[in-house]
Amino acid sequence: MDIKHIAAFSTGDQGGNPAGVVLGDSHPSETEMRRIAAELNYSETVFAMPVDGAQDHWRARYFSPESEVPFCGHATIALGAVLGQHAGAGRYQLRLNEADISVEATPSDVGMTATLASPPTRSRELNDEELSDTLTLFGLTEGDLDSRLKPAFIHGGADHILLPLRDRTTLAAMSYDLDAGREMMNHHGLVTVMLVNIRGDREFDVRNAFASGGVLEDPATGAAAAAFAGRLRDVGWPHAGSFTLHQGEDMGAPSQIHVSLSDVPGSSVQVTGTARDMRG
């Protein structure tokens, strides 16, 4: 079995979020996919097979070391890069468990660049239990929050909690217990908790706790980036059509995520990143 090892949302030849990419004429059994994902121990591994033999339409499933997830942004960027190398630059339709999306592969100076079109986005403010449980997990108080952006439950293909922090130093000091995080995230049906510090109107520093998948932190999280952009649009944040997210810097894996969006509420968000072959 040919497994590609791709770091998505990399910065030049550094950083990015590692993902396994497995292409085949059919999917392995679910037991086998879970085993492979656990052995690779990347935050996600994507398994893709052509739909009815078409090279531009693929069925994709995503697995963390501990669970299947409905959508993963960085693994989709990695998949787009591999499809671009496998079948050429262009747009590929992807059928997920709960949605249909696309990813477009484009050659670049540092390898392949890929742009995914997310599932529809939606968001709401947190209820009291969600906010209390999230603050408790990270040892924070409401005084640590940035009043310019309220905590929220956000969705762009998967569910996340958004926690905006007032100080960059608080973001850099993020810590929590993995087992407690897993219990809290599973209780609330979350894939990650996204902690954000506002660098500028259209630029943000972010960290994503991913205990639900057995991973303490994700270096780059495209699904959460899409959901976050949708939330900013929902609350009328000025965006001029794009945002840039800096992630992974505090864990030594600098990553950049570029997000493009329209003003149409709930519409798909485009998430772009470069990808590098970790073994090439």
Image (cartoon, rainbow, N blue to C red):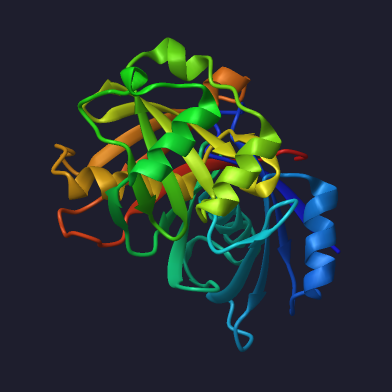
Which residue does the image show at 14% across and 37% down from the upper left? 238
| The N terminus sits in image quarter | bottom right
State the image coordinates of residue 124 (x, y, percent, origin top left). Answer: 28, 51
Q: Between 71 and 164, which is closer to the camera in this rendering?
A: 164
Q: Between 198 and 57, which is closer to the camera in this rendering?
A: 198
Residue 95 is at least partly visible in this image:
yes
| The C terminus sits in image quarter | top right
Q: How many marks?
A: 0
Relative side of 235 to 191, left or right? left
In the displayed structure, 65 sits above or below 24; it is above
Residue 110 is at least partly visible in this image:
no
State the image coordinates of residue 62 (x, y, percent, origin top left). Answer: 64, 61
Which residue does the image show at 56% across and 63% down from the upper left? 88
Instruction: Find residue 54 and report its image quarter.
Output: bottom right
Task: Identify the residue at the far bottom of this view.
Answer: 52
Which residue does the image show at 61% across and 28% down from the upper left? 13
State the image coordinates of residue 210 (x, y, percent, origin top left). Answer: 60, 41
Relative side of 197 to 137, left or right? left
